[in-house]
Image (cartoon, rainbow, N blue to C red):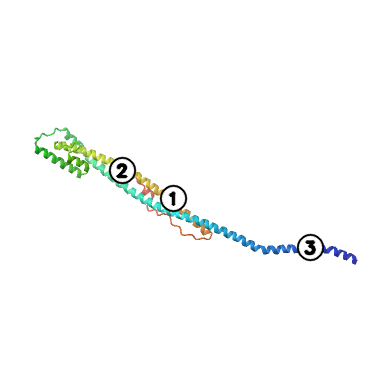
Amino acid sequence: MLETAMYNFLLGVPRAALIWLALMFLAVLAIAGLVARPSWNLSVGRLRRRDAALRRQRLTVQAQEADRYAEEVAVAAERAEARARRCREDWLAAQNEAEAAWQAYEKLAALTPRMAAAAAMPVPRTPHTPAEYAARERYLHRAATAAYWRGELSVLELGDVLAHRHGWDPRRHPVEQEVVLHRAARAGLRARYQRATEREQAAWRAAEMATLAAGSLRAEATVAAGQVRQLRHQLAGVGWRPVPVPAPPRQSEAPTQLLPVRVA
């Protein structure tokens, strides 16, 4: 019995030793894991902080660029709106000028039937003396000067009358002179109205283009300001406080109010 017990004991010692060695190896691994885990956590934390810093830096650069662009577009929109208002004022002035020219032409054209009747009548006979010709010349000068002050003749046309150029003959009878003056004034006012109409049309096109450009820039400025606010919100989400973003450009007038409406 003693020999059997010793034999069994000797056979169990290696097995027990192997079990103890395995248990010690597992304990060593567990201790090593516990020791290495804090350093691994520190590495992961540093990586996360570095990624957050890189993201903040990227968003900050984007926000600065977007802020600068939004400010530039806002200034351009304000200038475009000011130019649109000036163009509208110019168009209104040109429209008033064209309307005044048309009214002057209509007022003079109303006298056309009477002038046509006067031209159809025979010219009164008067003595052809130097005094008569001098009187006719004075009458022509007075009538042309009065037509100039009424706006029916231009400065150049008045100069032609006083200098007796381009067919202005002071020896004609006053009735003939009135007819010729009326025709010249009517033609001049008609041409003046046409020039005023062309200026009014050009001013209207310029005002329309300026208004559309102002509206486009205003919309672009609004979009740019929205992008800056979005980037600022993203920066606030990662723990960053960016520079305050300028508000969108103030709209002093609506685009429909700036856009000129032509009156036929």
Few, some or many residues within 10 Å of mark 1 (<14, 14–19, 20+): some
Please give the residue where the numbered disc 1 appears in the rendered image: 220
Amino acid type, residue under disc 1 in the picture: Glu
**202 relative to 252, above or below:** above
Q: Quadrant of the C terminus?
A: top left
Residue name at image x 56 percent, y 58 percent = 52
Identify the element where label 3 is drawn.
helix
Above or below 181: residue 222? below
- Residue 179 falls in which quadrant of the image? top left
Q: Residue at x 50, y 56 (%)?
A: 61
Residue 215 visible somewhere in the drawing: yes
Q: Which residue is mark 3?
A: 19
Quadrant in which the N terminus appears: bottom right
Question: What is the distance, in whole Å, between disc 2 and disc 1 at their CAs?
Answer: 31 Å
* Amino acid type of the residue tagged 3 in the rendering: Ile
Distance Cα–Cα, label 3 vs label 2 = 109 Å
Give the residue pinned by disc 2: 199
Secondary structure beneath dot 1 equals helix
Residue 131: image x %, image y %?
A: 9, 39
The spot of residue 245 in percent (x, y) is 45, 57
Sequence-earlier tag: 3 or 2: 3
- Say if residue 114 shows up in the picture: no
- Residue 138: x %, y % from top left: 13, 41
The percent coordinates of residue 37 (x first, y second) are: 66, 62
- Amino acid type at mark 2: Arg
Secondary element type, mark 2: helix
- Foreground residue among 58 and 70: 58
Tally the marks: 3
**Between 132 and 91, the one nearer to me in the picture:** 132
